[in-house]
Image (tube, rainbow, N blue to C red):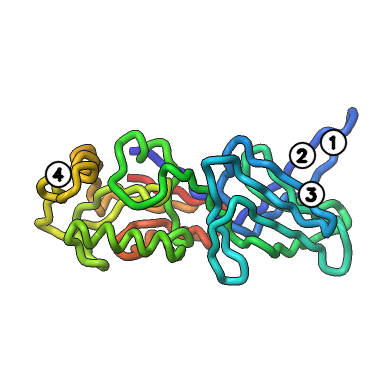
């Protein structure tokens, strides 16, 4: 059984050394930002915002004012109401955050409110292999609101003959644009393990390597503050970390 972290809204203290003393800078992040890939380029803009551009072979799903777009560059902004000292930054972990100095007690975020980096060769929805289940990041509740991902998920389920909201005692792991999650399969349903069953050679090969997990074994745990619950989005099991700083799924 393995646990994988899902990072949602978070505030943490970052301690930086200055000469022989230490200055404490509060890092406060109210957005959902997955780790950006190595080679991502940050650029400070004159208006105080930060542009982050992913390397060739990647793009970003980003949400701004309720609208999802796919782009190589996301813009994040931080402002301190009634003062100054809140600046957007790219952390060594690859996540975007904001740094607040002693003159700022609250940092308001704007611009991209969610960032999900995607490898172009992992676009689409299909079965996930054992290695992918162990190495790729978990899908979460907000990822499942992206229109392109929903469309491809429903097309995938239609190809398998599985109803959109089907539930069952077993799940099969799938890969959605480079993120993985278990998907309910109806009781009595057999995952097609051959190309003749799926009418798609590639899909049949991936199905033969698919990983299945009992639905009852899936658990979401909040490791730091708040609560984290297991949800089903079109039959895909995800953790909703909107009220948790550090949420993990075990299976």
Tell me residue 157's x, y (percent): 25, 60
| Mark 1 secondary-structure assignment | strand
Label 2 neighbour load within 10 Å: few <14, some 14-19, many 20+: few
**Which residue in the protein does label 1 denote?**
22
The foreground one among 22 and 125 is 125
Q: Nearer the viewer, mark 4 or mark 2?
A: 4
Q: SS of the residue at dot 2? A: strand
The residue pinned by badge 4 equals: 195
Q: Which of marks 4 and 3 is nearer the N terminus?
A: 3
Q: Are the residues tagged 1 and 2 within 8 Å (C-beta)?
A: yes
Q: Which numbered disc covers residue 206?
A: none
Q: Which of marks 4 and 1 is nearer the N terminus?
A: 1
Q: Position of residue 88 (x, y in %)?
A: 75, 52
Residue 117 position, x and y percent, is 53, 48
Label 4 and label 2: CA atoms lie apart by 55 Å
Q: Can you identify the residue that label 3 sits on?
A: 44
Nearer the observer: mark 3 or 1; the answer is 3
Mark 2 highlights which residue? Answer: 15
* 4 is higher (above) or lower (below) than 97: above
């Amino acid at each position: 059984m393995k646990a994988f972290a899902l990072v949602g809204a978070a505030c943490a203290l970052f301690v930086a050394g200055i000469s022989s003393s230490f200055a404490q800078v509060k890092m406060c992040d109210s957005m959902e930002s997955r780790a950006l890939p190595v080679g991502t380029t940050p650029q400070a803009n004159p208006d105080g915002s930060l542009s982050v551009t992913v390397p060739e072979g990647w793009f970003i799903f980003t949400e701004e004012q309720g609208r999802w777009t796919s782009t190589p560059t996301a813009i994040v902004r931080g402002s301190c109401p009634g003062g100054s000292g809140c600046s957007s930054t790219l952390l060594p972990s690859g996540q975007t955050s904001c740094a607040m100095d002693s003159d700022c007690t609250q940092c308001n975020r704007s611009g991209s409110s969610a960032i999900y980096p995607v490898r172009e060769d992992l676009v689409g929805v299909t079965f996930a292999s054992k290695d992918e289940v162990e190495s790729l990041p978990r899908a979460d509740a907000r990822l499942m609101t992206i229109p392109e991902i929903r469309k491809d998920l429903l097309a995938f389920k239609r190809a398998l003959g599985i109803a959109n909201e089907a539930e069952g005692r077993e799940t099969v792991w799938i890969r959605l644009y480079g993120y993985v999650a278990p998907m309910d399969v109806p009781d009595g349903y057999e995952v097609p393990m051959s190309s003749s069953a799926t009418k798609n050679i590639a899909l049949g090969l991936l199905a033969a390597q698919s990983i299945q997990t009992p639905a009852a074994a899936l658990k979401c745990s909040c490791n730091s503050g708040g609560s984290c619950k297991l949800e089903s989005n079109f039959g895909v099991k995800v953790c909703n970390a909107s009220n948790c700083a550090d949420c993990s799924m075990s299976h």
